[in-house]
Image: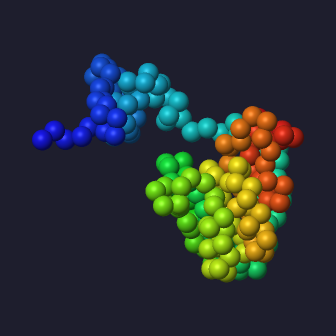
Amino acid sequence: MNARLSWLDARWTFAEVHPSVVAGHRQAGWCGPVAALLAARGLDREVWTTPASLDDLHDPYAMSGMAEAVERLRRAAAGGEHIRILTDYDVDGTTSSLILQAVLRRVAPGVVLDYHIPDRFTEGYGFSVEAAAKAAADGVSLLVTADIGVRDHAAVAAARAAGLDVLICDHHLPDGADVPHDAIVLCPPQPGCAYP
């Protein structure tokens, strides 16, 4: 019996790289597989090992909605509110969930904090009306999405109708589409956003 290679029966092949390039990445502190990947992609190890200056970052307040988002999170922290983080099930969604949980636990230890990552097979993609109803039933007062939400107008409306505030952190806005107007939205492609 042949083992299935992938859903598409694809076979991975790795680019040949000179061992000295991999060794250079290893000396910079990267483990073997990561060193080989960086070498295969032709990435300079200096880019990955030299810390950037905070001066290299864009002003976060240039992003439309940032002042409102910070104010709402501060109010939730001060009031010990129940916050739920809702993210996509892919790598940037799950990573966003972990980062948001870690930061909020550190800067707002008084909040009640939980998370929900939708099951791709039973719940599908995005922020659903069902997830909004469940958050309301669980006593959530602020729902923070990451990597989803900007296209989920019905779910945002359902959450708002149930008394929840919604903070959306997303980047999936299709050309010509608009963000939900009844949420705080952090999404650089939205109209009127000056964030580079």
Q: Give the image quarter of residue 70.
A: bottom right
For image coordinates 66% across by 72% down, the residue present is 133
Say whether residue 28 is left or right of residue 57.
left
Q: Position of residue 14 (x, y in %)?
A: 31, 26
Q: Residue 51 appears at what percent x and percent y?
A: 57, 39
* Residue furthest out toward the right: 192
Query: Which residue occupies 70% across, 49% down?
Result: 151
Q: Is residue 127 left or right of residue 19?
A: right
- In terms of image quadrants, where is residue 73? bottom right
Q: Nearer the viewer, residue 86 or 4?
A: 4
Residue 174: image location, x then y, percent: 71, 38
Which one is nearer the viewer's eye here, 83 or 62? Answer: 83
Vertical side of 76 occupied by 31: above or below: above
Residue at 73% from the left image edge and 59% from the top image edge: 154
Position above or below: 171 against 66: above
Which quadrant holds the N terminus? Answer: top left
